[in-house]
Image: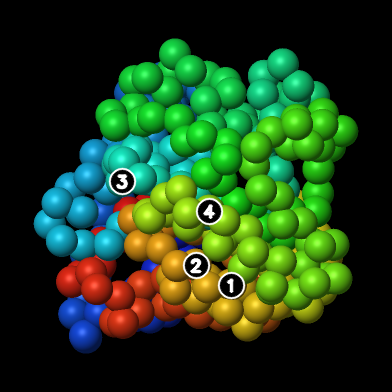
Amino acid sequence: MGAGPEYLLDNGLAAAVRPEDRRPSVTNVRHVIEPTAEVATAFELHALVSDQVRHTIAEGGFPLVLSGNCNTAAIGAMAGAGPEDLGIVWFDAHGEFNTPETTTTGFIDGMGLAIAVGHCWKAMAKGVPGFSAVPEANVVMAWVRELDGAELERLDVSGVAVVGARLIEKQGLQALGVALDDLSTRVGRVYVHVDLDVLDAEKVGKANEFAAEGGPDAEELRAALGMVRERFEVAAAGMASYDPAFDADRRVLRAAIASASALTNPTSPLASNGLER
């Protein structure tokens, strides 16, 4: 998945997000502290992304963070966007709601949303410039369908609005609209997170080895992103978890490009685009 950001940029995404034919600026964010350590390096990257996102916004641009994993895109972008009036709309097949106490794999990328709402790694998160946990009630999660037992229990007792794949299958995008309308009564800005394995592995293709059936097709995801933009200022966005090795026919690539365009097209009031990877 670490190969995803560069592959996306080199195969059409950069051209798709050009506002008024202006070339987007691209900044590569790489860790500098050695030796690497999973947790320490992850939070180093969060801090570096936060700085770049803050700079992009200050320059009048729109930050779209392309990342191999969810944590770097989400925590860094949220922190850089600032906590004022900020909510989260999270598109993902997986819950990303484990903590070090509940995980059975030790996979820190399975904790991204839990970190975002302040449930774990609190001391490390304090070192990310601008980071402030988002209240659970200000989070909408869409099309989630792959949860382990502890994660499901934690989400059930949380204030997160979970608009799961089964609910959308029964009620259509209206179910998402209800949750977004409710969120709009509390916040005006959102960080939008798109883990590309939210896409249906059968209808679209596998974004990575963790992809599952039951999600949206490309047009449904694009429509859902449009619903978000109709209701909120998108302060920053993240796109994560694309492994081109699983996308031989490039259907996921095309869906990713369409999604990025839906988030950043020239109808946005923002003047220019900045991309971090």
Disc 3 secondary structure class:
helix
- Disc 3 to disc 1, C-alpha distance: 22 Å
Disc 2 secondary structure class:
helix
Amino acid type indicated by mark 4: Leu
* Marks 1 and 4 in Cβ contact (< 8 Å): no
- Disc 3 to disc 4, C-alpha distance: 18 Å
- The numbered mark, 4 or 2, whose residue comes first in the sequence reads 4
Q: Position of residue 250 (x, y in %)?
A: 62, 78
Q: Is residue 123 visible?
A: yes
Looking at the picture, tell me which residue is in the foreground, 56 or 185: 185
Nearer mark to the viewer, of 3 and 2: 2
- Residue beneath label 4, please? 183
Amino acid type indicated by mark 2: Val
**Which mark is on residue 81?**
3
Looking at the picture, tell me which residue is in the foreground, 30 or 104: 104
* Marks 1 and 2 in Cβ contact (< 8 Å): yes
Disc 1 secondary structure class:
helix
- Residue beneath label 1, please? 224
